Image: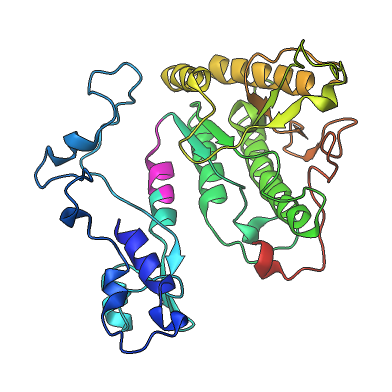
Amino acid sequence: MTNFEQRWRKAAKWRDFRLKKVTHWHEDALIKLDRISWIITPSPGPTGDHVVRITTEDDPENWHVQVQKYQVFRSIYSGSVRGFPKFVQDAEARKLVCGKNMKIDKSIHAAYVKAIRSGQHFVYIENQYFLGSTYYWPSYKNAGADTLIPMELALKICSKINAYEHFCVYIVIPMWPEGVPSSAAVQEILFWQGQTMSMMYQIIGQAINKTGLADMHHPQDYLNFYCLRKHESSSTESPFQTCNSSENRALVYMAIGCHSGPSTWAFLRIVFANQTLECMRKVNSIAKTNWQIYAAEEYKEMTGHLMQYPIQVNKDGKVTTLPSHECFPDVGGKVLGSSTNLPDALTT
């Protein structure tokens, strides 16, 4: 709620409405929920949120996560919110990063890093795209995407490989970021994403070779990228029914923590309960089959929405596109993107 209020107060400036003699309405721009009796809100105390729960504690569909307290993390800078400290000393006391006359909250990045370093068996991540750690990319090292998360994941896997232990990393991203996949902006983001994947897989491949496990293991035994898609069957009642698969391919929109239905939740429970090499290979087999069905010319029912991201990784960690699939089906645009003349700051 604090995050929303700070963002709202930054955006809701009553002077934009050219109203005179208004000195305090910026506070009233937010509704005071505790003043409206018919809106249910949490009450003070350890059980105060019970009144707003939509399921009971014993609901079998619940996920039970053991935490000491709930925390909200975010990535935002002072130009987008109102309420950040004005002075550097005060900002640093609140663990904000200061620079270029801005204060930046990177708590979500710090939380990711801490979770990765604390992981024992697996890491599961969903995001709208996945790029970072430019300082170790095969090329374009100065692109500016300096987030540590890709490198942290690669190093975590390497530490497990060196200890002859298994570790799974599942990363689910859209097939392409929001926008037209062949547009310059999306193509550049996909290019940065490809650089990130290449960097991670090459580090893992080197660790596998160094420990003498190359005959038994592949980089995708540890790290995999997936996307969510679906095949929609043609209606038998439609006069325009077709067996052409391109008519039936559809995107599954995803948000962090929000999947496409009960079948996906069931799948994730199985994955999280069985963190073994055999489990990851089984998941990869299913995801690969789903991609082949999705990309085929003729319609066939998919076994789920989870597909392998359409890349190919060799034993040394080199990333290429799948044979005959340099571009996305139907819509075009290179899977691994291409560099453009856009300023790097716009796409990293």
From the viewer's perspective, is residue 223 above or below residue 340?
A: above
260, 170: nearer the viewer: 260
In this rendering, position of residue 270 left or right of residue 200:
left
Q: Residue furthest right?
A: 324
| Magenta: main secondary structure | helix
Asked whether residue 195 appears in the rendered view, the answer is yes
Q: Residue 39 in the image: x percent, y percent?
A: 23, 46
> At 26% from the left edge and 45% from the top edge, which residue is drawn?
70
In this rendering, position of residue 68 left or right of residue 245:
left
The magenta segment is 112-120
Q: Residue furthest left?
A: 45
Asked whether residue 143 appears in the rendered view, the answer is no
Q: Residue 138 in the image: x percent, y percent?
A: 74, 54
Q: Is residue 115 magenta?
A: yes
Q: Residue 23 in the image: x percent, y percent?
A: 28, 85
* Residue 90, picture quadrant: bottom left
Q: Residue 156 in the image: x percent, y percent?
A: 49, 41
> At 77% from the left edge and 32% from the top edge, which residue is drawn?
314
From the viewer's perspective, is residue 310 above or below residue 73?
A: above
In which quadrant of the rendered image does the C terminus lie?
Answer: bottom right
In which quadrant of the rendered image does the N terminus lie?
Answer: bottom left
Q: Residue furthest top?
A: 236
137, 88: nearer the viewer: 88
From the viewer's perspective, is residue 120 above or below residue 81?
A: above
Q: Is residue 96 magenta?
A: no
* Residue 103, picture quadrant: bottom left
> At 32% from the left edge and 69% from the top edge, which residue is drawn?
29
